[in-house]
Amino acid sequence: MADTKDMTAPASTGRAWENDAVLTVEHLTMRFGGLTAVNDLSFNVGRGDITALIGPNGAGKTTVFNCVTGFYKPTEGRITMRHGKVSNDFIERVTDTGERYRVEGNAGVYLLERMPDFTISDKAKVARTFQNIRLFAGMTVLENLLVAQHNRLMVASNFTFGGLLGLPGYRKARQASMEKAIYWMERVNLLDRADDPAGDLPYGAQRRLEIARSMCTDPHLLCLDEPAAGLNPRESAELNDLLQFIRREHGTSILLIEHDMGVVMEISDHVVVLDYGEKISDGDAEAVRNDPKVIAAYLGVDDEEEIEEILEEDAEIAKAHARGEEVSDDVVMPEKAKAKSKAKPKAKKAAPAKARSEPVPAAAGATPAPAMAGGLNAPRDGKGDNLTRIKGIGPINEKKLNAHGIFHFDQIAAWKAADVKQAEDYLAFDGRIKREEWVKQAKTLAKGGDTDFSKRVDKGAVPSSRSGKGKGGSK
Amino acid sequence: MSSNDTQPADVNHPEGAQIKREERLAAPNLPADDPANSYAAAIKDAAIAALLAGVLGFFFLAIRTDIAPGGLEVTTRWALWIISMIVVFGGRLAISLFFRGGKAKGAGNKVVSAVAVPGLGTWLGRILFAFAVILPFFFVYFFPGRDRQFIDLAILIMTYIMLGWGLNIVVGLAGLLDLGYVAFYAVGAYSFALLATHFDFIGFWIALPLAGILAAFWGMILGFPVLRLRGDYLAIVTLAFGEIIRVVLLNWYEFTGGPDGVSGIPKPTLFGLEFTRGEGGFADFFGLEYDSIQRFIFLYYIIFILAIATNLITMRLRKMPIGRAWEALREDEIACRSLGINTTNTKLTAFSTGAMFGGLAGSFFATRQGFISPESFTFLESAIILAIVVLGGLGSQIGVVIASIVMIGGIELLRNLDFLQAIFGSNFDPTQYRMLIFGLAMVLIMVWKPRGLISSRNPSAIYKEKKAIGADMVAQGEGH
Amino acid sequence: MEYLIQQLINGLTLGSIYGLIAIGYTMVYGIIGMINFAHGDVFMVGSFIALAVFLILTSIFGFAFLPLVLLIVLIVSMLFTSAWGWTVERLAYRPLRGSFRLAPLITAIGMSIVLQNFVQVTQGARVKPLPPQISGGITLMEGSTEAGTIAVQLSYMQMIIIGVTFLLMVGFSLLIAKTPLGRAQRSCEQDQKMAALLGVNVDRTISLTFVMGAALAAVAGMMFLLLYGVVDFYIGFLAGVKAFTAAVLGGIGSLPGAMLGGLLIGLIETLWSGYFTVEYKDVAAFSILAIVLIFMPSGLLGKPEVEKV
């Protein structure tokens, strides 16, 4: 397994997830009846890192969360939480004795798949939030934060008996719990709403409160399930600050599921990408966003789908990817291991993934992305043709083609079979419209003609990179 | 216990009070009544209602089967049948013509009383408490002829208040729907009765804590298997447990006396002073004149103190971590688990605390009656106690008091409506309509105020100012 | 051996009655997710109506042809009991639709108290006996023991009960599976709001569910009357709880499940009474309920549900 190798590899880099993992997931498999939601997944969460778990809808991210936090018992696999510096040997010992967890001095090993859900928060110090917020809606903000300190208060109140008698130990603990609650309310800007029911708060505040509530359990690892979902850009930025603060001031490692690539790319130290329950990429944000398999997983669609649908989709994702594409040219592809990795997307995706993974031309050294045959360094008269007028080329592909020096219809019109192959390897999607078809369209367009599709582009009926402009753009 | 076990969760009902609230807001409102063409519609409506009443009542009002020599015979009561239809017609007409108009106003008032006067409950509570303290002397002084009857009724109401408060922990705070609460009442009563009749040295004051502990223990035993159940399933299993206990009490003749019950249960004493006539009794010791009312007053204060203790402990527990965990459990069990709360233990403590108070009330019941039998512990009792809790407003302590007074006191008042005999004839017995009216009142109050009479929740911890939380926020726990 | 077979036959007969009541529970639970606490009492009302109709026909109008009398009794009691079922829904459930979840439970318990006491007040509290109307049967087999010969009897009454139950069961399964009403019902089970958006009249569908449940309960009530020959105002409670047990045992929401559960509960109860003690037969039924719910909450034929996090 490529991953196991990564884990045991000598600490050659400064990556926490390789040499100081707080959470290790090994060969995790979760089946529901006949459905395999997560298949043989292994990854690490580095101590003090912000780790993002991303993937398309239905990739199994939340299932992984539920396994880590004990709400599901995994079908197979081991999930290890480490407190302090823990040797692999120690972990194996605990595994073999069949214990749920063991603490020796400062070091603790917790085998989460063996622990009931509530002890995972209590003992292993893993806290979580939920995709659809689960606050105690009928209790006040303050009460929500006090409930989170239940276990400490229970002990302090001698399991209620001391508290009923009003012993001083409990009073002190209650005071401390209030202070902690107030501290977190300040942190998440909810102090003035302390006595309001949590259900009355606006959505963004509820998300923040849920994070604050989890933090009141003093976690070593905080698992956030789509914390930015439904937040506006300002709230998203605040969330980033909050997470950075939690990591910096409290040393809490963070594992988050997120769809908002802005958030993911900005704050994550480490990104793990899932698709169809399997890991398809693992590395830092830069590496992952350039991984063709990731791009395929996010963009790949079936042949017969209507092109309009795809283009709409493209437009949505374009924003996220634009950032990635701009820098992609001078980035080393560090993922050699990936090309060899056995991770194989499911049948549906198998073809494109395979097609793409082999010829990625090893990107040796710091050379820019290879220009294609007949590629230019710049558009001939300063501006290129509107390539999106070709049915099958969206704004993203246009950008990619531009990056490869393809700016004009006549360049595409001149493509040979080998060029088509190369384009296929590099471009995010293939198979929808045959590249040969592109060539045919490009020939027409290069001559200044129109296709049915280009007319619609010109009318603005289809999203494109340049509205209306570009009829007979070159020549 | 693995958590991917199947649960009888209801897919149609998303979890969490938040979602529920949204659903309710999104739900289409009932069609508003149009006052313009209301008369014709109201008459038509009333006619349909009367017709329906006629259909429903035909085989019950118009026709009566009676046992006669040589089998059953059929008698007819057409007048009753027709009168019932006319009454329904008139009633329905009145409701649609007058009641509807006042509805909007009523809703407005409710908001005002719940939000603008948050201290109202507190003041009402204080006034009721003050009255409860002096109650026996009040009745002795102002109603010397009927003091016994009134104090007896006060004892009965106070018993239901205590039971209601006990069940409120389970249903109102922890959100666990328990329809077998009477089982713990029975356990308490039988524990005391059997202990006291088998061992001479055990009097009321020794047996009382024992009965409480035994009931709490039973709460745990019965609570443990039903922990994984939710909502109505939990209700029906607790109902089944309640019935099982009753059937066992009924059939275990050697131990419980079966249907004959246990008699000769000792009366409580005041530090060894018995409330009897003559030498060494309470009256003799204090140099008072003996009066049987003294024993009633004493019993009243026992149940009063027990009930107040129940209330104080509950209020105290609410502010403790365990009480907060109960309420959190009602709001969202999964979130509780994610915060490290052991939901099993939390539920069990709720069950056994509630059971303990039920058991204490049960042993008071036994000593007050001097005789107990399984007949006193039917499902109907559980239903009445639950109705008191729900009608009063889940989780509301003062609501339980009001509901007990209204339901139990109101029903007992029917015994005194002898004047009705003048109207309906001398063989009219108002008491036989008690339960019928009780059931109707349950339906009507619930339809009128589905969240109960006092529906807002007081927070258990305050940062700056105390704000009551509206009922629409508060979840109902395992009932979802 | 003969004794066992006889007990099995008796159990099936009793189980058929429980099954018919259980269908009412299971349909209502399926569609609104609530236990209709008053359903047992609707069954009781049904058997009182059947008694009244039977007496009117035989003693006032002097009908003598038993099959016709029974048919009329069946139809009339189904119709009138349906009206009761509709009223229960209209008073106790519809005003509280979409409201606080415990409220309809309390109103249903209230309706149960109302029905019991209404019948008690109007018809008297005493048990009403009806002499056996259908006698005779066929002897399936005979065996001899030291005590004498035991004959395994299948009475005509039992044949009628099992037969009618079977027919109704098939009819209702077809109704749910094939008709637009059944489709509306199933869609409301899945998602009421969505069904309403797609033009299903949810209120009417729910009402009809109660009506169908009540009609089946009326059949059960009539069978109960003919089989045991006694009714009183309190029979609804126990029969109701046991029928609910049956519905749960079979898997709530499943029609065949309700029938299967009913048969099993009937068998368990008669076998328990036959071989152990009659006194504790209710304990046996209740224990089954608790055990099934705790260990197999989706019942025998129900669909398991995964906890959503």
Image (cartoon, rainbow, N blue to C red):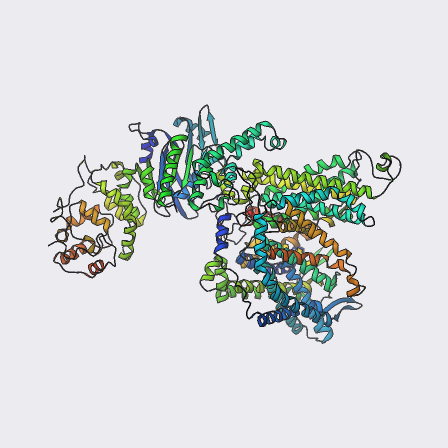
Q: Is residue B159 positioned above or below C226 on the image?
A: above
Locate residue C265, reporting x and y percent.
62, 54
Q: Residue furthest right?
A: B278
Q: Is residue B400 visible?
A: yes
Q: Residue furthest top?
A: A105
Tell me the residue at 62%/59% (across/down): C39
Locate residue A58, reporting x and y percent.
37, 48
Q: Is residue A132 left or right of residue B304?
A: left
Locate residue A359, reporting x and y percent.
20, 42
Question: Toward the viewer: B128 or B166?
Answer: B128
Locate residue A267, reporting x and y percent.
33, 37
Question: Toward the viewer: B430 or B360?
Answer: B430
Question: Toward the viewer: B137 or B361?
Answer: B137
Q: Is residue C234 visible?
A: no
Q: Is residue A238 left or right of residue C226?
A: left
Q: How many marks?
A: 0
Res B429 → quadrant: bottom right
